[in-house]
Image (cartoon, grey):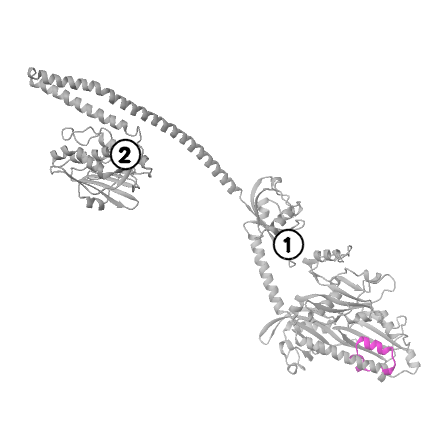
Amino acid sequence: MGALCPQAAATEELPGHSGVGFAALVPAAQLEEHVLRERQQGRHDYAVWPEGVRTFYGPIVYLEPDDWRNRRAIGYDMFSDPVRREAMVRAADTGDSALSGRVTLVQETDEDIQAGFLLYLPVYAGGGVPDTVEQRRRDLIGWIYSPFRMNDLMQGLLGATRSEVRLRIYDGLGRSEQTLMFDSHPERNDRALAGLSRTSALLIDGHRWTVELTALPEFAQAGWWRPGLVLTAGFILTLSVFALIWSMASTRARAVSLAASMTTALRQSEERFRVALEDSNIAVFSQDAELRYTWIFNPGHGVDPNRVIGKTDYQLAIPPKLVELKENVLREGVGLHQEVEASLFGQKYVFAVTLEPLRDNGDIVGLTAAAVDITSLKQAERKVKESEARFRTMFEHAAVGIMLTDCTQGDLIAVNPAFQQMLGYTETELRALPWRGFVAPESQVSLDSVVHALQSSSVNVYKRQEYYLRKQGERIVVSLTASLVWGTDGKPKYVLWMADDVSELRAAEERARRAYQELERRVHERTQELQHRTAELERSNAELEQFAYVASHDLQEPLRTVSSFAQLLERRYAHRLDAQAGEYLGYIVSGTSRMRAMILDLLALSRVGAWPPPPSSVDLNQVVEDVRGNLHQAAEESSAKIHFAPLPTIIGDYGELVQLFQNLLANAIKFRSERPPRIDVGVVDDGPEWRFFVCDNGIGIEKEQLQRVFIIFHRLHHKVEAEGTGIGLAICKKSLPDMVAASGSNRPQVKAHAFGSLCLNSPKAVLAIATSPRSAERYRQDAMVTVNIGSMSIKRTVP
């Protein structure tokens, strides 16, 4: 500390000097951290006093020598005292030492109370003095300071005071008991001799003292009357208070020597002050009682003193408000500090103006002033206020509830109207509740757990749903989002809570959930019902198939008996029967033949799918060749020509494929036009599937019959026009699923086409049979009208 403040070495030598100390600058947001840090360093009873809420604090954290008197001052907030604060702010803004006004030191006891003052020297982060006031305020960390007891100081400097001369020092420019700092003869009430009194004002480290030197009656009696020698105005005005006091205690020669040294020191101080002013935005000036400028220093704004000195405010068009303030100071004799807006060289500025009256022998002869350009500071303050206003507007008009609490005790800092309306409480009522007293018991969480979760989160967001209790007792569901607000010290300071009432949404979700459960229940019941019906249908179909098989098998024997005896009767007794009886016998034989064919077809239909064949490779070329051999007689009788291109090998059952193609080709021959039938069988390689086709020039199928061609016993033509039982295509349709199962392919489709065409289609293969008068090439290109009536699949296979 002695290295930082040279006065420390003189603490023991200079009377009245109580020591050297350090006062820290502590923003309100960092006060608790500051106290905790000091206590952690061993000062367990450390506290900042006096109590009170302030924007900044300036507590004493160090003071040497460490005696009982100085220890009483530790923790004292010097910023709480306006006199001390003014000097501290002045030192911080100027970057130079500053002397305070008259104070009573906190070290004083009930005995020998003296007037005191303090000398402050600012300390900035990084050492040195920043260039601008804004930077100084930003980098300021505290002050080195020295307290002085005025009586001890002066008595130590003066020693044995001469009784002929009385020295009194006042704080500021006024003279009263309240401003008296030192009186060399406090017990005397003698009036000063006429003409032997002189009062002068001294400016020391930015603060003014008034020095009054008077001659007592003993002065004249002792022959000391030397007014021109002792009380010269230049001697009083140029020396600092210490030089003045020191000169009163020394011989004339020593006084001259000290005056020279103090003048040099004063000039050096003034030079430092001038240099500091040149780099600052402070303007200082003085004016006489006519408000005529007698001196001005304003380097920051480039004012030429020659254009100002000697002129009045009225001539320079100074703003009327500032002129009025100056006139009040001259009239009332009381200084003031006020912010003033003014235009200078076409630009608008805001100045913090300090005005003090100048006196001579008690008369006001002018004023001194200092004006600090705080335009940028005001602009920054305006932006902050605008930002705060925008935040306040959003806060007050937000649709969701917002609450701000501290992150240690959970004390309510602010709450917006939406939050109050959501719960039905006023802000006062919410403040009276315990920590989150409106939260239902099952939703309670500790503040520490929330803060810990937020600090552990990389996104600084804490979300959950909670149950809140409104003032009327109603429970609501709230979607809560919390985040931390960090202080300038990098530590969490507040918790920002945002709550949105989602009770209606939760109710809607609950209704949707119940509806979904009800739907699932109904679907499950319907599925079980359908499964039951499917099982019943499968059982019924199985019984019907079994019945059809048994019936068709058992009916053949009586039919054979009827047919055999009818044929025998026709052969043996035909010559005995007349023509009508012969016709009746023909009907019996024909009917039993048709009945036998129908029973055989029913037997074939019932056998389809009863014993699924094992999957095997089938060469369709051989299948079609065998079918053409089976239909050789029918083809010759109808002059039909059957042509087929090379066909692939597929997975299926040879017997059923023969039956499939034979039924289709037989139909193409049977349902022919007047022209000789021409039948083409082929295949198209369609990428992932084979597309088979059979085309002929037959009579075709009417469009309205497309849904009916696969119905059992359904015939599109009378038995006179064409023989048949109406079961062939039904057998084809029923046999296809067996081939699908055998091949393991995907779900197929069976399609019928206009003009008598029939198409059997699947994702892996397509088997198309056409009986319309069109060529195979045209069939492959023409669009189709399709009706889904079944399923099949023939897998494309390379053996």
Q: Is residue 146 left or right of residue 274?
A: right
- Dot 2 or dot 1, earlier in sequence: 1
For label 1, the crowd category at 10 Å Cα-Cα, with few meaning under 14, some 14 to 19 and many 20 or more, is: some
Res. 653 mark: 2
User: Magenta segment, principal secondary structure?
Assistant: helix
Res. 492 mark: 1
- Residue 474, percent across and down? 58, 39
Which image quarter is the N terminus in? bottom right
Picture residue at 58% right of the left edge, 43% below the top: 466
Residue at the limit of the structure toward the right, as seen here: 221
Amino acid carrying label 1: it is: Pro
- Residue 598, percent across and down? 21, 25
- Residue 449, percent across and down? 63, 47
Q: Nearer the viewer, mark 2 or mark 1?
A: 2
Residue segment shown in magenta? 230-253
Q: Is residue 691 above or below residue 729?
A: below
Picture residue at 27% right of the left edge, 21% below the top: 550
